[in-house]
Structure formats: C-alpha cells, structure tokens
C-alpha cells in the first residue's frame, strides 16, 4: 500500500491545526503551525471560502491524516460504522481509536502514531499474550496489550516504559503500570476523542455516494 512520504508538517498547515504527526516536536517552537500558520503553497495565505463539499472534504481529510490511514482504509471504516446499529460517527471514531497502533500511541508507546505503527510492525507488543505486527489490528473490549518481555531491555523501549508510567491515558483504557499492560474496558465514544472536527460533515460526505 502506498504511503505519503512528503513533509508531515504540510498536512497540519493544510488543516490549520496541530495533528501531532511529529510527536514532541509539535509541542515546541519548531512546529510549522507556530512559524507559518497558513496553508502551504503559493496561495496559502489567501483564505478562500470553502463550499459545502469543501468543508466536508476537509473534515474527512483531517480525520484521515490524524489517524494515519489511507483513503481505502477510511472508506472501509465508514462502511463498517454505517452497517452497525447506533450513531455512525460514534462507531467510526470507536473503530479508529481501537486500532492497535492508536492504542499504543495513547499509552505512550511512540511519540506519534507513525512511530507507534513502526513499533507494532517490529513485533514489540502482544495482544492477549500473542505477538501482533499488524498496526490496523482491531482491538475489542477485554483485549490486553503488553510489551513483549524480551523487548523490555531495548533502550528505546525503556524510555517508552517511563512514558507509560507518567502518561495520563484515556478513560476507556485500564493500565497496570507495574505489569506494563493495558486493557480495553469499553469502546471509546466520540466525546473521548480530542480531535476538533465536525464529524457530521464526514457522514454527510459519504452519505451522498
């Protein structure tokens, strides 16, 4: 699957807000939003009024970039959310939040979702005691995520273990900071997600198709 390899900061500038794609750098004065708070490109400083479709598209793009998923993946998440009984937007964000790479990021295993995705790919974590190297692996209520014992002596992992012990995690995760495990105790709702986006615009965009 093709991955975007350009400058991550351009994505944040395009959306006009920090999406924390570069981890700790986003909290410093080096953040592109702090230095150039306008869209990239020759006409970036000219703020054109967006059409209804433009607003819907930007809402979808912002969410897609935030979670680091492809267009095809995002469509599948929407279709799955639409099929299920309940509020589509809540289900959509619940599916995105319970991706394994996102849960690792929420725990502090990686300063960004991209880094967390790499750690999963390197088989650093387990789910219910079994190695999983698929970043998009869908966690369910009751699933337990842990760092593999044989990886805990890794220098990078040691630093991340300290992050886990200090980080405030979402209420839908139950963390044992001694055993370094995290259990999904409920599916997160839209209110649990800190992304500022009008989710109704996303639903409107796809409901036209």
Image (cartoon, rainbow, N blue to C red):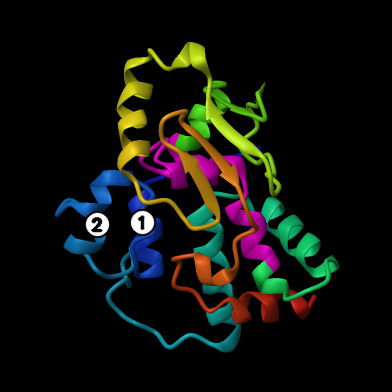
Q: Is residue 90 above or below residue 130?
A: below
**Residue 109 in the image: x percent, y percent?**
42, 35
Does residue 65 appear left or right of residue 84 in this picture? left
Q: Circle 2 is placed at which residue position? A: 32
Quadrant of image for the N terminus: top right
Q: Left or right of 36: which side holds 152?
A: right
- Identify residue for label 1: 10
**Residue extent of the magenta highlight:** 91-115
Tell me residue 112's x, y (percent).
Answer: 40, 43
Q: Residues within 10 Å of mark 1 (few under 14, many from 20)?
A: some
Label the magenta part by its dominant secondary structure.
helix
Q: Say which residue appears at 56% left-offset and 58% top-offset.
A: 64
Q: CA distance from mark 2 to mark 1?
A: 8 Å
Mark nearer the N terminus (2 vs 1)? 1
Task: In the rendered view, tell whether residue 118 sits above or below residue 148.
Answer: below
Q: Secondary structure at mark 1?
A: helix
Question: On the rendered structure, is 180 left or right of 83?
Answer: left
User: Can you tell which mark lies on residue 62?
Assistant: none
Nearer to the camera, 166 or 47: 166
The C terminus is located in which quarter? Answer: bottom right
> Any magenta on residue 185?
no
Answer with the quarter of the image where residue 127 lies.
top right
- In this rendered view, identify the residue nearer to me: 17 or 7: 17
> Crowding at label 2, few (<14), some or many (≥20) Cα neighbours within 10 Å?
many
């Amino acid at each position: 699957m093709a991955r975007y390899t350009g400058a991550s900061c351009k994505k944040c500038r395009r959306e006009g807000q920090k999406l924390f794609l570069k981890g700790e750098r986003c909290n410093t004065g080096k953040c592109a939003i702090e230095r150039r708070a306008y869209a990239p490109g020759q006409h970036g400083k000219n703020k054109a009024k967006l059409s209804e479709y433009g607003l819907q598209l930007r809402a979808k793009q912002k969410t897609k970039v935030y979670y680091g998923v492809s267009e095809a993946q995002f469509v599948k998440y929407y279709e799955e959310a639409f099929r299920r009984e309940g509020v589509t937007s809540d289900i959509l964000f619940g599916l995105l939040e319970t991706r394994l790479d996102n849960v690792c990021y929420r725990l502090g295993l990686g300063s960004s979702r991209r880094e967390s995705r790499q750690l999963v790919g390197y088989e650093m974590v387990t789910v219910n005691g079994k190695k999983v190297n698929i970043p998009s692996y869908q966690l369910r209520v009751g699933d337990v995520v842990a760092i593999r014992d044989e990886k805990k002596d890794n220098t990078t992992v040691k630093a991340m273990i300290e992050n886990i012990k200090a980080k405030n995690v979402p209420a839908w995760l139950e963390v044992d900071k001694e055993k370094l495990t995290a259990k999904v105790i409920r599916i997160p709702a839209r209110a649990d997600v800190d992304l500022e986006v009008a989710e109704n615009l996303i639903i409107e965009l796809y409901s036209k198709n």
